Amino acid sequence: MFDRFNRNITYLRISVTDRCNFRCKYCMPAEGVVWKNRDEILSFNEILDVVRAGTKLGIKKIRLTGGEPLVRKDLPELVSMLSLLPEIDEIGMTTNGVFLPKYAKELKAAGLSRVNISLDTLDPEKFKKITRLGNLEDALKGIDAAIEAELLPVKINFVRIKGENEKDEETVRAFCKARNLKIRFIKQMDLRTGEFYTVEGGEGGICSICNRLRLTADGYLVPCLHSNLRYNVRELGIEDAYRQAVQNKPKTGLGTDTHEFSNIGG
């Protein structure tokens, strides 16, 4: 499935919920968030239909995001459903890690390949300040659970927040080296202005090789994180939504006012 710029689209990021148990400063406001109604959120069967149709067009890699994906009830069931599709080579998940002690082994058994876990500092007070609701110890237990369940390689997402956690970078880097974790440094971005950067340790932010589409929790296929373009799979039909998303995928992002990091999963 190639777009106008000869990029082969093989990767679908799926936001399974817009809800989260954190309120990270770079992702969500502290309060006043308007949640989607339950009937707006795609069911597991609807998500499966979208992925199945995507595999016929070349989708091979899935990443589950949120919000926090593990606040979605029975998420291992969705992983199991997706893992039965023979065309899918990898199912990953981005998470804050808090619920991994409860679900890591079940997710692995269901077919989850690996996880990315957010960790922006190893200072407990600063962690609480950045996440507003989180406890560092819970995140660290989640990392341990992911390693024990062999959701490998475990990758750590460190968001560089100007004026907040510059001094924490080296301690987190050393922590990852000691635990054999891969680390990705992500400079804080602005969806409104289209301000974005390449991801150190990853392929994000390199428009010329972008092979991604995103599916929002309420059913929109989004061809670019930093764009207003979006195509509803319920209104257009899944195949037509894919066709338009791929054909209209922009060369580079310019900014958006249709979504936030919190409801599209980054």
Image (spheres, grey):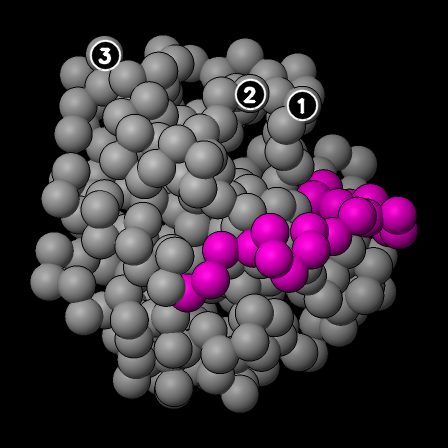
In this view, the residue in front, 39 or 182, is: 39
User: Can you tell which mark lies on residue 228?
Assistant: 2
Q: Count the numbered circles shown.
A: 3
Left or right of residue 210: residue 44: right
Pointer 2 or 1: first along the chain: 2
- Please tell me which of labels 1 and 3 falls first in the chain: 3
Mark 3: give few (<14), some (14-19) or many (20+) Cα within 10 Å.
few
Left or right? Give the position of 248 relative to 6: right
Q: What residue type is labelled 2?
A: Asn
Tag 3 residue: 4
Image quadrant assignment for residue 147? bottom left
Between the C-alphas of marks 3 and 2, the distance is 18 Å
Image quadrant assignment for residue 177: bottom left
The three-letter amino acid code for the residue at tag 3 is Arg
Give the extent of the magenta segment.
25-44
Report which quarter residue 194 is drawn in.
top right
Label placed on residue 257:
1
Residue 210 lies, in percent from the top left, at: 31, 27
